[in-house]
Amino acid sequence: MHILAISPGEGFAPARWARVAASGVDALMIREPGLEAGDLLRAARWLRAGWPDLEVWVNGRLDVALLAGCGLHAPEAYPEVDPARVPLSRPVHDPAQVAARRGARQLILSPVYPVPGKNPPWGPAGLRRVLDGLPRGAFRVLALGGIDPANAGSLRHPRLDGVALIRALWAAPDPGAAVRALRASWAEPR
């Protein structure tokens, strides 16, 4: 199970970010639209220096991703980027988008469950329908949107590599305990 933590857009707070980075997640996406390029670059370099095994992604800033040596998450309206230039992650909010985004290293399908201010949720059955049509191993596939330790295990599918989370980690009193609970939920027999 691959767990991607997505920063909540509340600025760079090193102590809080350290708790999430050290929680056992596999990757962290910096999604901080309020930060200037220099601050994003400092945050990305800080993460890479402190947690060298942590995969780091920057949302929407190719310049920062290239300078920091990390991946780029190209949001919905982002111009096309050659995936040979930088590790590329793309969102999928509509199943029809999958074919056009197959060149990415990572696809994030969302929202699975209801999330304030987002599109109507796909639900577990809708997610499974999309996953059933995806080729195995061509790119990493993560689910996002309202996922927590209580429902993560019900999403398991041979083509789903893991989950991406915001509130379930950043609002958790103990992000490490949340990660352990997610992994236990994922490992439970269905």
Image (tube, rainbow, N blue to C red):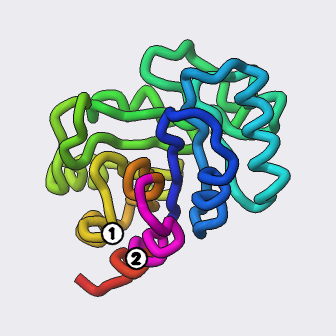
Three-letter code for the amino acid on which mark 1 is drawn: Pro
Task: Report crowding for label 1: few under 14, some 14 to 19, many 20 or more residues within 10 A (C-alpha).
Answer: some
Three-letter code for the amino acid on which mark 2 is drawn: Ala
Specify the label residue 149 is tagged with. 1
- Percent x, y for residue 171? 41, 54
Q: Residue at x 55, y 37 (%)?
A: 89
Residue indicated by mark 2: 181
- Residue 137 seen in this snapshot: yes
Specify the label residue 76 is tagged with. none
- Percent x, y for residue 87? 68, 38
The image shows residue 153, relative to residue 163, as above or below, that is: below
- Percent x, y for residue 159? 38, 60
Left/right placement of residue 142 relative to residue 126 reads right
Image: magenta residue range:
171-182
Q: Residue at x 40, y 81 (%)?
A: 184
The image shows residue 62, relative to residue 95, as above or below, that is: above
Q: Label 1's element?
A: loop
Q: Label 2's element?
A: helix
175 falls in the magenta region:
yes
